[in-house]
Amino acid sequence: MAVFTPVTLDDLSQWISQFDLGKAHAIKGISSGIENTNFFITTDSGEYVLTVFEKLTFEQLPFYLNLMRHLAERGVSVPAPIANHEGSIINALHGKPASIVTKLVGESQLAPAPVHCAAVGAMLARMHLAGSNFPMRQGNLRGIQWWNETAPTVLPYLSAEQQELLTQEIATQNAYAASPDYAALQQGPIHADLFRNNVMFDGEHLTGFFDFYFAGCDTWLFDVAVTVNDWCIDLQTGELDEARVRAMLDAYHAVRPFTAAEQAAWQTMLRAGALRFWLSRLYDFHLPRDAEMLTPHDPGHFERILKLRIAHPAPPLFGNH
Ligand SMILES: Nc1ncnc2c1ncn2[C@@H]1O[C@H](COP(=O)(O)OP(=O)(O)O)[C@@H](O)[C@H]1O
Ligand SMILES: N[C@@H](CCOP(=O)(O)O)C(=O)O
């Protein structure tokens, strides 16, 4: 159960009068969240999601929520934040920042077929294009700087072989990030955590991307790599499933054609996508921040994926197939 901040129907009834949503009729805690307290709420205007942010602050939130608003206004399927009568989309509830966003229909597709991967690829490309004129800037807070800062804190917990893998991979990524090839990659706001549990489907119809709280500005290709490394693999082995990879990449390419520079970067970027989550999972596993971090995710999963991406070339972004 992960309702850290209880909100009653009475609390909501008062708070919601600042919005143009009519009266509140029901509020139901969502148990699956691990970062924030989420509720489904029903009002005269329909169903919404209320989020009370447990860690993110009033200063940090505008980037994420304005990005969601920017994307929603441009036809990308993401939850749209609802503004109050003063136009504010972040408002205090029980002393914490809170927001109401539109509710996406459907459920997560945890066993995706090529058709689902194609839908994710096409929407991801549309999201990158729509985000390219978003005026706010925030780096990827789980990007290369964070990898360099975090690796030394987890190294003491690793075997000699793991230490070697981590150190070598960070050196590879640092060298690549400093190269002119890297500088040629297109950048902009990215989701950066587009796993199966952060996308909603109604059957085969993609109804939205959500959970934008790792979003930041980074290469578009890094977002593609993170997404392929979750959606297009056999979860037991970490191996890529060629049919799902092709479906996702072809659908993306049809909306926003990949460049030659991206093709050249692709194998390295898949490794970067694996490294990022190996490192965050190692950190959460060995250095848990607080008791409410429920069951930590298995770091071994992304260690396996990193080794596989080093050992075997993945299908190309385009061409040769
Ligand atoms: N806009 C939304 N529409 C529908 N369901 C949502 C929406 N936002 C969150 N949810 C539901 O709430 C759950 C937890 O949300 P999530 O953003 O993943 O929380 P956390 O970041 O705390 O893990 C999701 O798995 C999903 O079922
Ligand atoms: N996708 C990350 C963990 C982030 O959790 P989320 O529920 O907020 O997506 C991982 O698998 O390590």
Image (cartoon, helix red, strand yellow):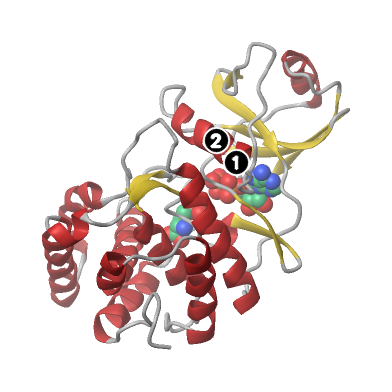
How packed mark 1 is, by other alpha carbons closer than 10 Å (few <14, some 14-19, many 20 or more), is: some
The disc at residue 306 is none
Single out the mark in the foreground, 1 or 2: 1
Q: Nearer the viewer, residue 292 or 260?
A: 260
Query: Which image quadrant: the C terminus?
Result: bottom left
Q: Quadrant of residue 103?
A: top right
In this view, 296 is above or below 229: above
How packed mark 2 is, by other alpha carbons closer than 10 Å (few <14, some 14-19, many 20 or more), is: many
* Residue at left offset 88%, top offset 28%: 44
Q: Nearer the viewer, residue 131 or 85?
A: 131
Q: Amino acid at mark 1?
A: Arg
Q: Is residue 179 left or right of residue 28?
A: left
Residue 260's x, y, as percent? Answer: 29, 69
> Quick check: is the Cβ at mark 2 less than 8 Å away from ligand 1?
no
Q: Is residue 119 left or right of residue 266?
A: right
Q: Quadrant of residue 89?
A: top right
Residue 37's x, y, as percent? Answer: 60, 37
Q: Is residue 251 left or right of residue 262?
A: right
* Residue at left offset 63%, top offset 32%: 81
Q: Secondary structure at mark 2?
A: helix
* Residue at left offset 36%, top offset 80%: 316
Residue 279's x, y, as percent? Answer: 29, 59
Residue 54's x, y, as percent? Answer: 51, 32
The disc at residue 74 is 1
Name the residue beneath numbered marker 2. 70
In this view, 134 is above or below 261: above
Q: Amino acid at mark 2?
A: His
* Residue at left offset 47%, top offset 49%: 129
**Cβ–Cβ under 8 Å for marks 1 and 2:** yes
